[in-house]
Image: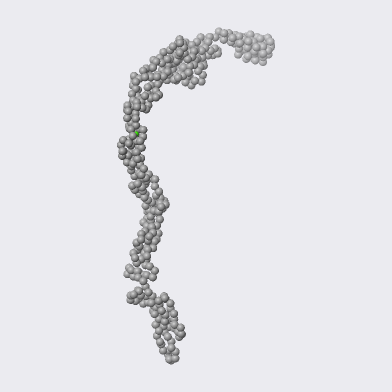
Amino acid sequence: DYKDNLLDLFHNNSELMTSANKTCWNAEQSIYLSCMYDAAQLQSLDAAEEASLAVSQEVSAKAVASNFAPEFNMPTNITVHSSTTFNLTINVTDKDGNPIVLSIQEPSNDTSMWLDGNVLVWQVGINISAFNLTIVATDSMGAPTSWTPVVLYIDCENGATHSFNYTTGETVVGENFYRAQCSCPSGYQGDRCDVTPCSAQPNPCYNASMCHMYSNGSYYCDSCPDGMVGDGQVCEDTNECLETPGICQEQCTNLVPGYRCNCTTPGFRVSPSNSSLCEDIDECATGDNRCRADQNQTCVNTNGSYTCTCPMAGFKLNALYECEDINECRVNSTNPCGGDYICINNIGNYSCDCAHNKIKVNGACVSVQINVDVVDSATTATGGETNNQNQALIISLSVVGGVVLVTVVVLSIVFGLRARVPVEVLVNPTSGTS
Ligand SMILES: [Ca+2]
Ligand SMILES: [Ca+2]
Ligand SMILES: [Ca+2]
């Protein structure tokens, strides 16, 4: 019957009643009825919305007015040391029980500082500039509160003592940032006492790596480097080349400190095992040679140099490091074949042969002569009327001044016709004809 009465109130306009119900229900519950009443009386959804809005604004204004901002329960000072990580839990409460969001307002965009939940994490550097550290807490009603502690910053090193002078302003580098004054132990220097005697310029020792600190702040120097004389603070070079003649096998160069031996003879280098001595460079091992792998040459190391050998007998290396044929016939003035023979060069070897007009007989080259004899014999023809002549041509070879070796050819030529003209056989100028 409540709904029936309500529908009555809306003059049976159920559509308006449904819309008004939707609008008014979203408002504060306490004004639901007056919202619905306004909508029904004025027959207007807008009226209902206006009534709803007015009341809700009034309610939130009351809530903001009565809201309490968050409260920090934090110290007024924090002390931080350089090169350490500073962790601090931010203790903040809200009387209304609203949720709180924390943020770092200052320094902004500083990657060395961040919030991990409600813990402030700060990787404290050295030589940092003054700034105000401000943490802001904001509750869900948008009410903010900030906390800006006085930062007491200590970056003294090497066991220095420190103090803060809040009155003279000497150490005040920012309104809420104080940097400690450092009192250095003996031997140390610098605003932060970070300069030790060994890191001071100039270094008290001959070179910085020779300087060492005692725990009490004093220092000592190593003895001078090899090749130098002095007390470690002042060191002077000795000229080994002058003081020890012959200290190097070849060339000596004085260095500060020390000295260096050089080898000036081509093909030699300083011995790896004894830097005073020079030793042959094995060009075959180092690869620094001109031997031709494509011709299968073999590299042979020699004292001071190297040679390349050709793989086959009868070849030698030329100036271009190529294997070329040896002309054995011209190696020296002596004929390698001996006096009776002529020498013939071949690729890769040579051969021996008898000279022109000589032949090899029993291992010796001998000259030969060609003898030609023509023999006539008169023949009486049958019937006795014609005289024909038979002529025989006899060619024989003989060693000059010796006996006839062999009668090579006996030619018996029977001429069918009378030879009116003598046969001429020209063998050589000394041979005659008949
Ligand atoms: Ca020297
Ligand atoms: Ca060599
Ligand atoms: Ca040859």
Quadrant of the rendered image containing residue 367: bottom left
Q: Is residue 411 above or below residue 298?
A: below
Residue at x 59% of width, y 9% of height: 61
The percent position of residue 59, horizontal first and vertical second, equals 59, 9
Q: Is residue 34 visible?
A: yes
Quadrant the C terminus occupies: bottom left
Q: Is residue 44 above or below residue 369?
A: above
Depth order, front residue of 149/69 = 149
Quadrant of the rendered image containing residue 256: top left
Depth order, front residue of 43/359 = 359
The percent position of residue 236, horizontal first and vertical second, equals 34, 30
Residue at x 44% of width, y 82% of height: 422
Colouring used for the render: one colour
Q: Is residue 92 visible?
A: no
The percent position of residue 333, horizontal first and vertical second, equals 36, 61
Depth order, front residue of 299/413 = 299
Q: Residue furthest front?
A: 242
Q: Is residue 12 left or right of residue 96?
A: right
Quadrant the N terminus occupies: top right
